[in-house]
Amino acid sequence: MRRFLSRKLITYLIAFVIGVTVDWGIPRLIPGDPVQAYLSQFRLQPAGYDALYKTMSEAFGTNGSAWDQYMHYWQSILTWNMGVSIGNFPARVTTLIGQALPYTLALLIPAIVLSYILGNRLGAAAARRKGLDNSVLPLGYVFQAMPYPWLALIIPYLLAVVWHVFPLSGGYSNSLLPTWSWTFIGSLLTHWFLPFLTVFLVSLGGWAIGMRNLVIYELENDSSRYLRALGARERVIRRYAYRNASLPQLSGLALQLGVVVGGNIVTEIAFQYPGLGKLLYTAIGNKDYFLLQGIFIFIIIGVLIANFVIDLVFISIDPRTRLSMQGAPA
Amino acid sequence: MSLTVENLSVAYRSRRGDITAVDSVSFRLADGEIMGLAGESGSGKSTIGNALIYMDPRMKLAGGKALLDGKELPLSDNDAMRKLRMTEVSLVPQYAMSALPPTRRIGKIIADLLKSHGIKDRDEVLSELLRRLELIGLKDEILRRYAFELSGGMRQRVTIIMSSLLNPSLLIADEVTSALDVSTQRAVGEMLIEFRDRGYIKSAIAITHDLSILAQIADSITIMYAGRLAEKASTAAITEAPLHPYTQALIASLPEVGVRHEDTTLTGIPGRPPSLVNPPSGCRFRERCPFAFEKCTETPPFAEIRPGHQVACWKVSQEHGGGARVTVPAGAIADSASTKGTGK
Ligand SMILES: Nc1ncnc2c1ncn2[C@@H]1O[C@H](COP(=O)(O)OP(=O)(O)O)[C@@H](O)[C@H]1O
Ligand code: SF4
Ligand SMILES: [Mg+2]
């Protein structure tokens, strides 16, 4: 166990170093320098430009040799001081990320987890009831195959524009100030619902179809045949099939939860929902390099941590991972 | 008689019509008999074994019946068969390496099976299980393991113990030695004998394409060719004085009795078994038989040419002349069964 954990930790550490290096290198491969790009937005006198350029380069750490910059970059990461956003000057990058994160997590985690739970049940039921299968399968495919932006247009159009049941966009009503009042929380919830619903519906179809196909496959495989040949009741065989099918589904869930910190750009843009995805999108639009770098670093760390946690969870659930952990042949 | 199989025909439903994989097969198994069932791959051995315990949805009974201890097995009635599985007739499947459910401990799987059979006194079965594990040299700790934690030989032994736990009258052991190395093969083969001797199972059908292992464990050997029986006799008669030309070729192609060989290929005889989709009429070995003559365009009966020795060959029954006693008019029934099978 200890050996397994330290081996995993080293892998994650290496991934982290590579991620940080790439994150540092990519913006620097883009032609032009960010400070120059930023300052060129303004009409500045050459003297003022030079002075500003010098100060800002120092402030952002874009002067000095590549090695110095790289080291400086590491320092800023380790002290969690990602600098100041160019686009939202003078807001700190870490503050902006901290503000956006709760929206993304509150949107995606419930949508993914609830669709996982319900989708698995639907799929397993469809695998054994023909009638249900005939409705779940086509519906599932419709939701899964529908281009998401289209769904993200239809649902808000009906529920927000035609029926006025839910607000169309934003994280909360513009007329409110963020406070912990019931009115504000209510506003948060109504704004949360539509983006949640679209993400939920799209992944629901995927989970249901996946589970249905897996259960049907498991019901026909060798171990089910053997149980049948030994006279096990069909109920027992189904339970085994469901159990076997749950593991690949669970890795699918783990994969999705692992990248949750990246936000869901399309949803957040469609609903103008102030999560990390929207922040990232705006940062790209503003050529806000520091914010971009900060978000990427955050995503890298988030994905690595999430995956490490998931690894730990899997060890306790799937007996096969426990075995490979001990290094025995599977 | 432990098992009596009469004119059993089994077909697979396929897009090109039904494939009669087992064509009017008849044989008997005495109490305590371990019958080896041998033949090339694809000759229908597993199909016989599976038909006697569990017909999957692709299979169907195309004719005939089977009696176990005098009572007819409700072969195509899945619900009625379910209660008899494991208790009266049991199977160690050909796919034993992948047969154990992967996500549950061995002990739990066994407990679930006992529950399915509504067995009240589970403690008694459990202590019996522990006794048998010890007999085979497996630690009872194995019950807390998952299938993938076991070696191939251990998996094979666990499935045999599991399948025979409720003392079935008949155990069908399909290729139980094929996936194993030579020393484990021997041990697993002897397990069958031991279980029979101790009365855990009354009789067994040991299916294999490997004749040399049967020479060690079987009381009688039945040879199959292209969905039909070619010959059945005592192990000594089959290995030392086989009568059917196909059996003779099989025995001749054995490098040496007791030495394992990968697949039963007939080095001396060119050709392959006929397709079962549209099998030729008459003796199915005709194309490859060095002794084929006019008569062989008719289906030879599976005739008892001397007590306990049955052969389906015109040449053999002519040579053993008047003495031949036809037990089963295989020809007529076989042809009608296969027409019935493919007609749909
Ligand atoms: N699921 C199936 N569908 C159609 N045909 C099958 C199926 N399984 C087996 N068969 C046919 O039945 C024949 C006998 O198969 P099998 O009983 O497995 O042979 P053996 O066990 O002797 O190797 C094969 O030649 C094959 O053509
Ligand atoms: S019946 Fe004829 S073809 Fe068939 S094995 Fe006997 S001699 Fe050969
Ligand atoms: Mg087989």
Image: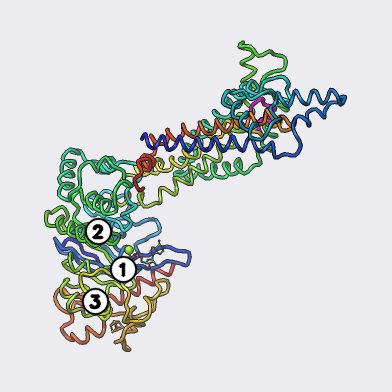
Name the residue that disc number 1 marks.
Answer: B262
The foreground one among B150 and A93 is: A93
Of labels 3 and 1, earlier in sequence is: 3
* Region in magenta: A266-278
What chain does badge 3 belong to?
Answer: B
In front: label 2 or label 1: 1
State which image quarter holds ligand 3: bottom left
Q: Which label was assigned to residue B251?
A: 3
Name the residue that disc number 2 marks.
Answer: B172
> Which image quarter is the C terminus of chain B in?
bottom left
Of labels 2 and 1, earlier in sequence is: 2
Q: Position of residue B292 (x, y in %)?
A: 31, 86
> Which residue is at the far left?
B198
Q: Bin the neighbour count of mark 3 within 10 Å (Cα to Cα): few under 14, some 14-19, many 20 and up.
A: many
Q: Position of residue B174 (x, y in %)?
A: 28, 60
Identify which amino acid the numbered label 3 is placed on.
Ile
Q: Mark 2 and mark 1 in contact? Answer it, CB < 8 Å.
A: no
What chain does badge 1 belong to?
Answer: B
